[in-house]
Image: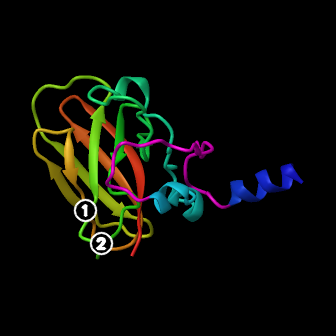
Amino acid sequence: MLLLVVVVSGGCTAGRRPQPAPTQTAPALSAPTWSASAQAAPTAAARTGCGSPVDTGPLPEWARAGFTGDSSMPHVLGDHGTIVAAMFGHPLAVTRPDGSSNKILWIAKDPAPPGDLQIDATRDGTHTPVRRTVPSGPGPSIIDLPQPGCWRLTLTWPGHSDTLDLTYQP
């Protein structure tokens, strides 16, 4: 039975990189900007098949500077492991009627010379990228994208680049 699940799951991600299993932990967060219902819900990546799973466990050790106590929060690690998108506005959404924002803290593994973080986001099934810039990034940002779905982000900052997927809900 397990083999059947593995074979069927593999067929759902044709053309995408292999997906590691998302870490599901019960975070004890001090960050009040995301709701308890978002904590308990399965990750967007797990539900949609979007290539980069949302991890709700602790941030990677190299990404914990400035955090005190438990660093568990929703985050996505770049494909090359050089950047983390720490999501204070999880789940990400095109429309946020509660007044909250799609706040993402971009944390780079290695220091970079001064410059901007350029984000070219392409929605799954399309070819036209949407560009966003985080001045003096990586760092804090509000990243709004125009339509719901799975977005492939190509991230470049001085001397570095990485990619990851983020899911935006309606």
Q: What scheme was used to colour the molecule?
A: rainbow
- Closer to the camera, 10 or 167? 167
Numbered label tally: 2
Kindly identify the residue that appears in the image at 42 percent across and 34 percent down: 59
Specify the quadrant of the image occupied by residue 90: bottom left
Q: Which residue is mark 1?
A: 101
For this rendering, which residue is in front, 161 or 106? Answer: 106
Q: Residue 60: give x, y in percent of width and height.
A: 43, 29
> Is 93 placed left or right of 157 in the picture?
right
The answer to which image quadrant residue 21 occupies is top right
Q: Which residues are magenta?
A: 12-35
* Residue beneath disc 2: 96
Q: Residues within 10 Å of mark 1 (few under 14, many from 20)?
A: many
**Rounded to the nearest whole Å, what is the CA distance between mark 2 and mark 1?**
7 Å
For the residue labelled by badge 1, is the local secondary structure a helix, a strand or a loop?
loop
Residue, x 27% and y 43% (percent of image)?
A: 105
Q: Position of residue 165 (x, y in %)?
A: 42, 53
Q: Amino acid at mark 2?
A: Arg
CB contact under 8 Å: marks 2 and 1:
yes
The residue drawn where x is 35% and y is 66% is 127
Q: Which secondary structure, mark 2?
A: loop
Q: Quadrant of the N terminus?
A: bottom right
As drawn, is 90 to the left or to the right of 99?
A: right
- Where is the C terminus found, in terms of image quarters? bottom left
Residue occupying the far right of the picture: 1
Q: Which amino acid type corresponds to the residue marked 1 in the rendered image? A: Ser
Disc 2 crowd, CA 10 A, few/some/many (<14, 14-19, 20+): few
Q: Position of residue 48 (x, y in %)?
A: 55, 64
With 68 as the anchor, is 142 left or right in this view? left
Vertical relation: 167 (above or below) 148: above
